[in-house]
Image (tube, coloured by chain):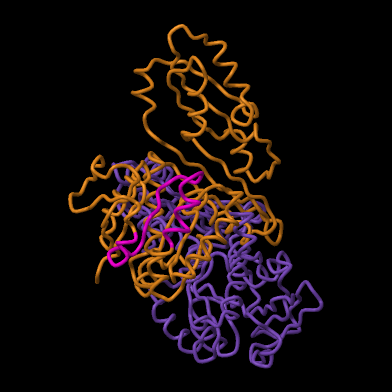
Chain colours: A purple, B orange
Amino acid sequence: MSKIRIGIVGYGNLGRGVELAVMQNPDMELVAVFTRRNPSTIQVSNDSVGVYLVEDIKDFQDKIDVMILCGGSAKDLPEQTPEISQWFHTIDSFDTHALIPEFFEKVDKTAKMSDKVSIISVGWDPGLFSLNRLLGEVVLPVGNTYTFWGDGLSQGHSDAVRRIVGVKNAVQYTLPVQEAVDRVRNGEQPELSTREKHKRECFVVLEEGASRKEVEQQIITMPNYFADYDTTVHFISEEELEKNHSGMPHGGFVIRSGVSGNQDRQLMEFSLKLESNPNFTSSVLVAFARAAYRLGQLGQSGAKTVYDIPFGLLSPKSAAQLRAELL
Amino acid sequence: MSKIRIGIVGYGNLGRGVELAVMQNPDMELVAVFTRRNPSTIQVSNDSVGVYLVEDIKDFQDKIDVMILCGGSAKDLPEQTPEISQWFHTIDSFDTHALIPEFFEKVDKTAKMSDKVSIISVGWDPGLFSLNRLLGEVVLPVGNTYTFWGDGLSQGHSDAVRRIVGVKNAVQYTLPVQEAVDRVRNGEQPELSTREKHKRECFVVLEEGASRKEVEQQIITMPNYFADYDTTVHFISEEELEKNHSGMPHGGFVIRSGVSGNQDRQLMEFSLKLESNPNFTSSVLVAFARAAYRLGQLGQSGAKTVYDIPFGLLSPKSAAQLRAELL
């Protein structure tokens, strides 16, 4: 059987993760990486993989089946997904929740015109967590759903701290509040405020001469980012930051706490504990690339989300094999 | 919009659970219960629901959309699902793993001939756990999957203990071995024997004059059921059994422990903690009944498993609503 031919658009953390994830899937091969940078400045791990300018992407229509779009949700994907779905099946991780309906409609139009399948908003949240939020409410319609994130590095919040005058470098972690998690797991169904669900922890390297007190004050009072949370600020050395805080861990859990028939308390939980957030997200994208390809073979087209994909299509195994081995 | 009309075949723990679960889903209504017993001996909770003999089921072709089959896998379902799928969409919880392929083929034939959808082997295992076993191996192809069951009451093992001479009554619980669970959650990927994964605990009421020692010995050496496990036997009074062991709790977890791209350890876990095993299973059956009905409306037919069902079809919400609210 011929392999599913994959292209990567955007070669940051996510793009590199997709490159590694494709290597773990013997039914796929990476054909090319597309970038807006100068291709000669990019070193991919396999010499047989070409690096090209995004402008040249449409020349690859006969060589690539699925393009995995690894750009950001703010600027890249709103343009790239509609454009690239004119020529290829696509997968992206568009995660601006409020704009998903509009984005879906736009992509659906182009993908339907080109007879391609475009699965949007894939990853773990949106993505695997979304699947579990749905599963929770359909199986236990009487109940509450709780999504907790962490322990995990937040890129956006780390950047916000780094922008403060006097901060040389910083990372920020989001952590679920253990007491809240315990109450939910205990079947209590509490109402939880933002502050009661998550807390934030910052590790900051100061510029020489900067005031701890002032920097701390600026962090913990920052609206939207920190003011609504209990935030702890630790000041550490550059070496310590490098040594202990250079990974990108993340995770979290979706809990559905409900009652069935006779007021029986029932608890469903899906959780992730990730040493590398981008490499896990990439692995999810790659599995859904297989489903996009298969849906295309079945004659489907248009924009899809994780809610439209039967799990069987995610696997290289046949339906009969899945029934015999895994059900 | 008209409601999805549900019928129940078999009115034991599972059938009663389906009756209660349908009440939690406003887009469905229970029309009738079918039994092999004398219908007049069966008291359902809602007077508007009729109770009929299974033999009369085909008279209901215009009145019921989906039949939820609540019989056992050993004797009932192998006959009932193929027969009833001649006239109705069906859902069942067929759980004899080794016979699933053969069962699927048989049901597929009848359901395709009648243009009906028949989703087999629905519940939590097989069912929700199967979905998570698949998800684990497609997202983290390099890794190991672990399924643990418990703490939970096992009907089959309880029956086996009750058959021992000198035992008046008994219940048996299956429990995951905490040390094994901790090692897996810690990302170790150990090889685990049957004994290392689960242990068994029995609560036994003796007949007057029966020997504790002999009964205990018979339990812990019983082949297939107990010999391969560390088993603890507690002798208790009839009152204590009634008071503390009359529920049907169960649960368990599916853990995928894998490594992505750069040897990053990644952990996915799905877990259930259930006060009532049959009422939870029923709730899953009812959610998939909605999907069977919807697939039928889309013109599909034949046997399906949970692997063939996009999650979106499980929900009463429209695809657009799901994208806006839940993704």
Task: Determine which quarter of the picture holds residue A85.
Answer: bottom right
Residue located 47% across and 71% down the image:
A308
A275, A100: nearer the viewer: A100
Position in image of residue B294 (x %, y %)? 38, 70
In which quadrant of the rendered image does the N terminus of chain B lie?
bottom left
Q: Would you say B307 lies left or right of A180 here?
A: right
Image: B43 above or below B104: above
Residue A164 seen in the figure: no
Give the camera-side residue of B74 and A35.
Answer: B74
Coordinates of residue A184 in the picture (x, y in percent)? 38, 45
Above/below status of B16 relative to B259? above
Q: Which residue is more in the foreground, B52 or B192?
A: B52
In the displayed structure image, the side of residue A49 where residue A67 appears, left or right: left
Farthest residue, direction right: A47
Q: Is residue B223 above or below residue B69?
A: above
Q: Position of residue A274 (x, y in %)?
A: 59, 55
Q: Which residues are magenta?
A: B58-85
The quarter in which the C terminus of chain B is drawn is bottom left
Residue B83 drawn in magenta: yes
Percent position of residue A167, x then y: 53, 62
